[in-house]
């Protein structure tokens, strides 16, 4: 965004008009917000990165360059996401609701990295994460293992409990 022009097409001074004053006020407000955004972004950076990004004139350019440099999912991050998905185990102190939310968050992260996990693999991983030998889970494991119509865990809109959807 640039400062409003001070002369019209006929080279007359327009700084005393209402339109110019409104444009100038909007420009000054934008500059203040942009400066705050730039300072906030720079403040959140490690010291060794500040010099690399402080030369961008507006926050949007700075943000775009940061996103270009660090926004892509690297192979290392992708491996870490997949490893987290494959090694997750339910914590006996947490409820099934919390367990399912954790799994769904992992799936969202993987989907955001353009990794599709099939419904079969999702079901298999849910079963794998359950504590082995715990009789409380046997009916759930049996249902998940033998019912091919089960697709995903969904939160019921009418209650706060989890239900299986087909």
Image: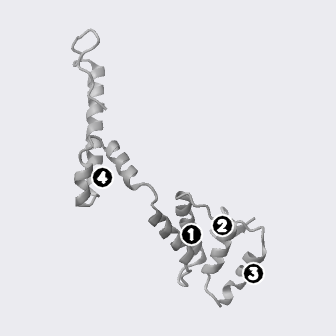
- Residue 130 at x, y percent in the picture: 62, 82
Query: Residue at left 27%, top 14%?
Result: 8
- Residue 18 at x, y percent in the picture: 28, 20
Mark sitting earlier along the chain (3/4): 4
Q: Mark 4 points at which residue?
A: 41
Helix, strand or loop under label 3: helix
Q: Mark 1 points at which residue?
A: 101
**Alpha-carbon span between mark 3 and mark 4:** 51 Å
| Left or right of 72, for residue 160 | right
Say if 56 sits above or below 153 in the image. Answer: above
- Report the front residue among 53 and 151: 53
Mark sitting earlier along the chain (4/2): 4
| Callout 1–callout 3 Cβ contact below 8 Å | no
Viewer-nearest of discs 1 and 4: 4
Q: Name the residue under label 3.
A: 142
Helix, strand or loop under label 2: loop
């Amino acid at each position: 965004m640039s400062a409003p022009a001070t002369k019209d097409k006929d080279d007359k001074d327009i700084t005393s008009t209402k339109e110019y004053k409104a444009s100038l006020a909007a420009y000054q407000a934008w500059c203040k917000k942009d400066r705050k955004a730039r300072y906030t972004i720079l403040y959140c950076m490690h010291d060794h990165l500040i010099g690399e990004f402080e030369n961008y004139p507006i926050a949007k350019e700075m943000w775009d360059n940061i996103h270009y440099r660090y926004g892509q999912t690297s192979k290392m991050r992708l491996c870490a996401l997949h490893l987290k998905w494959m090694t997750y185990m339910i914590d006996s102190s947490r409820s099934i609701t919390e367990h399912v939310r954790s799994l769904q968050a992992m799936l969202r992260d993987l989907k955001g990295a353009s990794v599709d996990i099939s419904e079969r693999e999702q079901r298999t991983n849910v079963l794998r994460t359950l504590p082995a030998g715990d009789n409380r889970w046997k009916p759930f494991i049996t249902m998940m293992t033998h019912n091919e119509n089960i697709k995903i865990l969904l939160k019921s809109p009418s209650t706060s409990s989890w239900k299986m959807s087909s």
